[in-house]
Amino acid sequence: MEKNKMVTVWTSGDKEVALKMAFMYTYNAKFKGWWEDVTLVVWGPSSKLLSEDKELQEYIAKMKEAGVVLEACKSCSDMYGVSEDLEKLGIDVKYMGQPLTNYLKQGVSVLTV
């Protein structure tokens, strides 16, 4: 079991949910050392929102600088036509079904927002 790994799966297309929960907790979890290994997965409507919002993009850069691993669901981002935009932000865009399944099977703490 992965005792010191946390993954946030951010699916909401609501900016306030991103700023006031998903991003705030994920960033602080890494920056303050609450978890050793922290990953943010951009999934669904969040991929479109992130591709369009400069404030969220700046926050993503701050997370990356703090050491948060950034991933995005390729299937979702392809549906919104934003895969290249997310890649330019330094996000690893890939099909996430199997990786998420692996996180769950490994006992990683997964937070969905």
Image: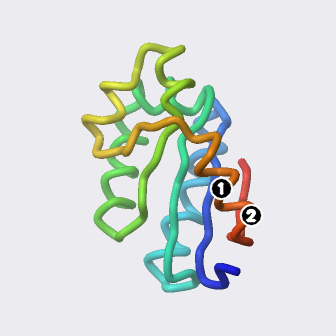
Image label count: 2
Residue ID at (45%, 33%) = 50
* N-term mark: 2 or 1: 1
Residue ID at (62%, 29%) = 44
What percent of the width, then of the height, locates residue 68?
Answer: 42, 64
Q: Secondary structure at mark 1?
A: helix
User: Which label sits on residue 51?
Assistant: none
Left or right of 96? Residue 85 is: left
Asked whether 102 or 24 is in front, the reply is 102
What percent of the width, then of the height, locates residue 76?
Answer: 56, 24
**With respect to residue 81, does 109 lie above or below?**
below
Q: Nearer the viewer, mark 2 or mark 1?
A: 2
User: Which label sits on residue 21?
Assistant: 1
Q: Amino acid at mark 1?
A: Met
- Quarter of the picture holding the N terminus: bottom right
Q: CA distance from mark 2 to mark 1?
A: 25 Å
Residue ID at (42%, 60%) = 69
Residue ID at (54%, 55%) = 23
User: Which label sits on residue 105?
Assistant: 2
What percent of the width, then of the height, locates residue 15?
Answer: 58, 36
Label 2 environment density (alpha carbons within 10 Å; few <14, some 14–19, many ≥20): few
Left or right of 65? Residue 92 is: right
What percent of the width, then of the height, locates residue 12?
Answer: 67, 35
